[in-house]
Image (tube, grey):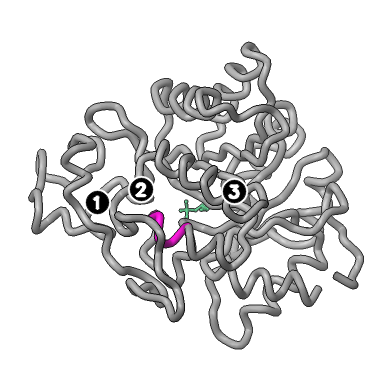
Amino acid sequence: AQAALNTLDGKAPLVIAHRGASGYLPEHTLGGYELAIRMGADYIEPDLQLTKDGHLVAMHDTSLARTTNVEQVLGARNGNYRTSDYTLAELKTLTVNPSGGLAQETYPGFNPSSATPYKIPTFQEVIDFAKQQSALTGREIGIYPEMKTAGAEIEAKVFDTLVANGYKTGDKVFIQSFHASSIQNVHARQTELGYDFNLVVLGSASAINTLGLANIAAYADGVGVSITSAGMGQSFIEAAHGVNLKVHGYTFSKFDGTAKQQYLDFFVYGIDGVFSNFTDIAIDARTEF
Ligand code: G3P
């Protein structure tokens, strides 16, 4: 790295594998997370939802229809395909679809090590995998769970699962949500129990500004901001840094000839982390910066 680092901590910006290497392999699968780790991701990002029987699973949409073969295997439940209407055992009968971007079920030169690379993983399985990969690669693979829904059950379970797995303050963990109230609740819970995991509120630049950067800084460590939202840019990042908030940008999803430049622009602005579908391009850009 040659250019000045304008990040809040002066360190290189983080490369966060958005739903795994989701530009190449099915999102939220062990196969996709593994490829991202192989490409050099600092963090893997699972979106989390609760099953009918209270298990946390990695799944972005409320509905299972887009990313799995639920329609063929299980059919609709209560007129819909909500994750919360199926048990974990049922979800384990499904396969995650190749979907979106360039996603496919193969990537040249890559063979997933998991026996079930394209099943829906539980949060526990994602954690186990990150720990296994950390041991294997000799570098700590961070995890960046997102609570997709709000509510006491998911807020408690995400935090308690991290603690039960031995994560401590200072480990490579960020907990994120679009629901500021959820982040406030996790902040209250972890403060009471003596933990200080990194917490991030998500939204467009205007949604974040409406909440107020200084208000957010009272309970969170950073904001995750849409890079295409009006008002997201250098002055926004500087304002956030002014109240000690990191800024992570979502979603870096380009894969054409302009992709690398987009990272480089935001690195100049001082962005602290990038949610990327193409981990390899993000790493290339960071190396070049
Ligand atoms: O967490 C940042 C980004 O992932 C938020 O968007 O919809 O992909 O969860 P989404």
Pair 2/3: label in front: 3
Q: Could you tell which of marks 3 and 1 lies nearer the N-terminus?
A: 1
Single out the residue that lies furthest toward the front.
136
Q: Is residue 27 above or below residue 188?
A: below
Which residue bears the numbered disc 3? 134
30 within the magenta span: yes
Q: Residues within 10 Å of mark 2 (few under 14, many from 20)?
A: many
Q: Could you tell which of marks 1 and 2 lies nearer the N-terminus?
A: 2
Kindly indicate whether the residue at mark 1 contacts the one at mark 3 (C-beta within 8 angstroms): no
Task: Identify the image quadrant of residue 163.
Answer: top right
Where residue 278 appears, as percent x and y from the top left, is 54, 70
- Is 103 left, or right, of 211 in this rendering? left
Q: Quadrant of the N terminus?
A: bottom right
Kindly indicate whether the residue at mark 2 contacts the one at mark 1 (C-beta within 8 angstroms): yes
Label 1 – label 2 distance at C-alpha: 8 Å
- Is 130 left, or right, of 111 in this rendering? right
Single out the residue that lies furthest toward the bottom.
257
Which residue bears the numbered disc 2? 59
| Magenta stretch, residue numbers | 28-33
Q: Secondary structure at mark 3?
A: helix
In terms of depth relative to the viewer, which is nearer, 235 or 101?
101
Residue 251 in view (yes/no): no
Which residue bears the numbered disc 1? 64
Where residue 13 appears, as percent x and y from the top left, is 75, 58
